[in-house]
Image (cartoon, rainbow, N blue to C red):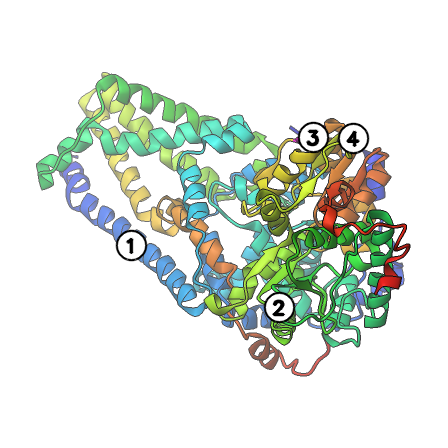
Amino acid sequence: MRTNQINNEERIKAFKTAKKSEVIERQKLNVRYHVEDFDVNDRPRRFLEAFAAILKHSNYRMALDHYSRVAARCSHCATTCQIYQATGNTEDIPCHRSELLLDVYRRHFTLGGMFKGRISSSGYLTDEKIQEMAEAYWNCTACRRCVLECPMGIDHGLITHLARYILSEIGIVPRALVISTREQLEGASRNTSAVPVPALKDTLEFLEDDMFEEKSVKIKFPLDVKESEFVFFPAVSDFLMEAETLMGIAAVFAATGDKWTIGTGYFDGINYGLFYSDRILERVIHNVDDETKRLNGDKILIGECGHASRTAKNFMPVFCGGKEATPVVSILEYTHKAWKEGRLKLNPEVITQKVAYHDPCNFARNRWIVNQPREVLKSFCKNYVEMTPTGENNICCGGGGGTVSIDEIRPYRTTVGGKLKADQIRKSGCDILVAPCANCKKQLRELVEDQGINCQIVGLHDLIYKAIVFDESLVVKKEKNPTGKEEN
Amino acid sequence: METLLNFARGPLFRLCFALMVLGLIRILFLDVWAALKAFRKTDDKRMPWKLIFSRTWEWIFPFKRLKNNFQLYSVISILFHIGLIIVPIFLFAHIQLWKESVGISWISLSYSWAFWLTTGTIIFAVSMFIGRLVIKQTKLLSRKQDYLWLLLLLIPFVTGFVCANLTVSPATYHFFMLVHMLSGELIFVLIPFSKIAHCVLAPLSQVISVLAWKFPPMTDDDICTTLNKKGAKV
Ligand code: SF4
């Protein structure tokens, strides 16, 4: 069963910390990710206070009670977790990891536990236990694959989410995520990559020129167009790193002629709240909602990003008025629909290499978006291959749950987290791996680089951009019109 | 002995059975109540019923899980559960008791089915016990109660098997019968307070998890006030 385990050399590489010992000493926290300095005194008490406050204002008690009652400790989950499969460390068994928090819950927040604690005066929450949780819950990629295997239906991903939430309230949360979120919620740029609006405009203009050059079609990135059908929120990092994906999306809209826009007031779909805090999650959701309302848009359109799509789709109705909430559409759904309606023509001669599709967990785990991108891909990629397992059973890229943004744990992500994925990619023999998610793309690129796999990682719209065929009426004859700009 | 047996078969059985039923109703009620409260609290009333039902179905009939990820331990566990549920409910002798006391009866297992299912359940329970002892990850996760439960569940099966299939002296028979009944009754009483509660709660897991992800809105202020964090930076 554990043939996939890493060897000793890889183990040393994966678990080596980049942190200085004096920092670990000062912060009294031996984890591989960087944390901003925080109050290290009285951590157990503060952890319990945060836990109590969260329990009071949430539904977590329901889940914790239920999970505590049914947990059978059968270890079925161990066979699916890519982390345990790679390390073979018993601490990485999902059920064991969840038990760390369930144990604290039972001991400190249930009558039976408190009573038992009184008699035996043991089982108190200690600094060591907090340290263990800080390590364990950020080793997990919150991919929720173990959910499928647990015979009792325990959602270990939810427990990881809650544990990280409580830890974050006492200051234990990866610095990379907090800094980005701070910029998004309190900074001048209002986005996680600190892209100022003028830079955004420059980038988009540049991309428009590029597209005209390549396609001879005037493809636009419409900014602040009121009353558009779609207000677009990509992972903001796409503006810096995924030009082809954005160009593909703009090209699809040029072909369909539907009205879409990017709001300059707020244009970031990223929501790190999903990874560590319900409070943050809600605040980011409101920002997206406010911008859509400012522009009087009909729908929220999320770019190629799994977590951004899942957060918007699931939490817009949760936080913004249920049925009344603005509808959310993923760009994968939009493009699939346009293709199905015959409004999108793709040339099947352009992509000749072997192409495979990676399911981002946040799209596939709950069977939301599984077949749509495959149908589109198969229609124009002659040499399409499937990896196994796929769909709701997919294997996480190894950078899920926000871990991909933590650069200092890259060796862990690419030797442990992505180990199974790397084996899967190798086995498929694909030349191009399509991963319609900003986080998956970053992780997979690092993974293939570190694992020495010869495979190109792209978004779905990167390929669509290459293969798209425009209606003759949209193509500008270049001799008469050497640049798109002159016409403007 | 006779009086003891009659007591175990009569009033004690009724008491323990009633305690089990009431205990299970209690935890089921608590679970459903919490779920309803969560549902009422959220504005998002969408429930992915198709997903919930199909995953619950896969829990009851875990073939898909096995197809995707074949594990000997899972197969044994499934077979063990089949015997564990079917034998006590459909055993002819048990149905006779129900018929005599409350006048209801239902279809029963034939002798050979009962024999093989009981034998299988005993073998599978022993295998699971050994599995818990030797499989690294299962061993680590196992608590005392996980071992004890397997042993406890074995007792009524082994004693029942002896009484039904072996020729023993009346005294031995009575002794085994008494142990059979008392252990069964102990199991009844413990079910609602232990992990075996999953027999009624696990079908709710999917609904509970879906609802748990529907976080109540506007908790930012409340939590910040409680934790004295108002105005603190992100
Ligand atoms: S959520 Fe994913 S990484 Fe975390 S325990 Fe489950 S399978 Fe492992």
Q: CA distance from mark 4 to mark 2?
A: 39 Å
Residue mark closest to the camera, 2 vs 1: 2
Corner quadrant of residue B29: bottom left
Q: Tell me, yes or no, whether the two marked residues, 2 and 1, touch with CB atoms within 8 Å.
A: no
Callout 4: SS: loop
Between discs 2 and 3, the one toward the N terminus: 2
Report whether mark 2 lies on the same chain as mark 3. yes
Magenta segment boundaries in residue numbering: A382-387
Q: Which chain hosts label 2?
A: A
Cβ–Cβ below 8 Å for labels 4 and 3?
no
Real-space Cα separation, disc 1 to disc 3, in angstroms: 53 Å
Q: Are marks 1 and 3 on the same chain?
A: no
Indicate whether A443 appears above or below A265.
above
| Quadrant in the picture for residue A370 | top right
In the picture, the disc for residue B106 is none
Residue denoted by label 4: A353
Same chain letter for marks 4 and 2: yes
The C terminus of chain B is located in which quarter?
bottom right
Query: At label 1, which amino acid type do we have?
Result: Ile
Instruction: Report how far apart the C-alphas of labels 2 and 3 lie in the structure.
Output: 36 Å
Foreground pick, A248 / B165: A248
